[in-house]
Amino acid sequence: MAAGTTSAQGALRWDGEHLHALDQTRLPAAEEWLELTGAADTAAAIRRLAIRGAPVIGIAAAYGLAMELAALPGLGTLERAWEELRAARPTAVNLAWAVDRVRGAALGAGPTRMAAAARGEAQLIQAQEDAASVAIAAAGAELLAGTRRVVTHCNTGALATGGTGSALGIVGALHAAGGVEVLVCETRPLLQGARLTVWELGRAGIPHHLVVDAAAPGLIRAGAADAVIVGCDRVAANGDVANKVGTYPLALAARAAGIPFVVAGPTSSIDPALVDGTAIQIEERDADEVRTLAGMDVTVPGTPVRNPAFDVTPADLVTALVTERGVARPPTAARIAELLA
């Protein structure tokens, strides 16, 4: 992708020197853009969820490493910035995948071409993730042709991915093919469904209702949805899926109701090094996200809290995994290996 371009409708803009990122913590109240110049500020934006969504944090981290090398070329800079960015968030594999690619390109180019190679690889990653969204949307819409009522969780649109989205890209394609209505889970932490998915669906003119996370399984049981479509932060080699916490109950509800539970994401979200989901590191977030609301205590101060940001859905609950390289239906180890071959 050439300098000065941006993901379609997306959360990132690359001007050739610096990365501009839509601060997603400010949405939907305000559309504010951050100008990032290196590894430290990019990592900080990822940690505080100003930049979030598995593919997008990978793209951003790739640019963060490239910018750091442009400012201070050298092997020491490369290794320091690579480690800092790789550690910014632990669960989504896209981040490590992207910075590993940029590091490899820089090392392969040699000292004098290191910065240029890193920048070129970051641009290539963004272009590939944008193209992946287009393919995922088409494949998912074909798989779910005729579906008119869906449940989705967290945020999987242009804010979270390259291009127009993964699960929400499929929703958009279904809507274009004949109309669709969406039940949007509010989604902890930070209400990413309520703040971000509702914002994106509204801008796209797609009918939707917001529901609290705990209400969605009951609505599925009552027949309010034809399918559940979610994204993914990491997929193990056997098809187990880590996604935003609250995904697993939706999979159980879909199985009980006899409707498809579809996971959508680029192959950059697949981690073939993990045999199954038990090895996925689950991020635990700040307890005050649960203990407080709008700066006010909602429980006894100091109450012990468990606040996992993700859960793992076993592969046998997943109807299909939709990627830019095809659909694994169901997502068995053999079918996933074929996608990555």
Image: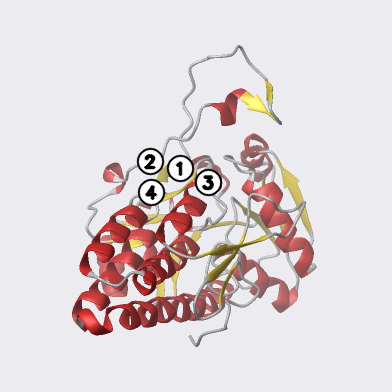
Badge 2 vs badge 1, beta-carbon distance below 8 Å: yes
Dot 4 amino acid type? Thr
Give the structural element (helix, strand or loop) at label 3: loop
Q: Nearer the viewer, residue 140 or 278?
A: 278
Badge 4 vs badge 1, beta-carbon distance below 8 Å: yes
Give the structural element (helix, strand or loop) at label 1: strand
Dot 1 amino acid type? Phe
Badge 4 vs badge 2, beta-carbon distance below 8 Å: yes
Q: Residues within 10 Å of mark 2 (few under 14, many from 20)?
A: many
Separation (CA) of disc 2 from disc 1: 6 Å
Separation (CA) of disc 4 from disc 1: 8 Å
Give the structural element (helix, strand or loop) at label 2: loop
Identify residue for label 1.
Answer: 310
Separation (CA) of disc 3 from disc 1: 16 Å
Dot 2 amino acid type? Ile
Q: Is residue 11 left or right of residue 44?
A: right
Q: How many marks?
A: 4
Separation (CA) of disc 4 from disc 3: 14 Å
- Nearer to us of marks 3 and 2 is 3
- Nearer to us of marks 4 and 1 is 4
Residue 48 is labelled as 3
Residue 91 is labelled as 4
- Nearer to us of marks 3 and 1 is 3
Q: Earlier in the sequence, mark 3 or mark 1?
A: 3
**Which quadrant of the structure image shows residue 221?**
top right
Dot 3 amino acid type? Arg
Identify residue for label 2.
Answer: 282
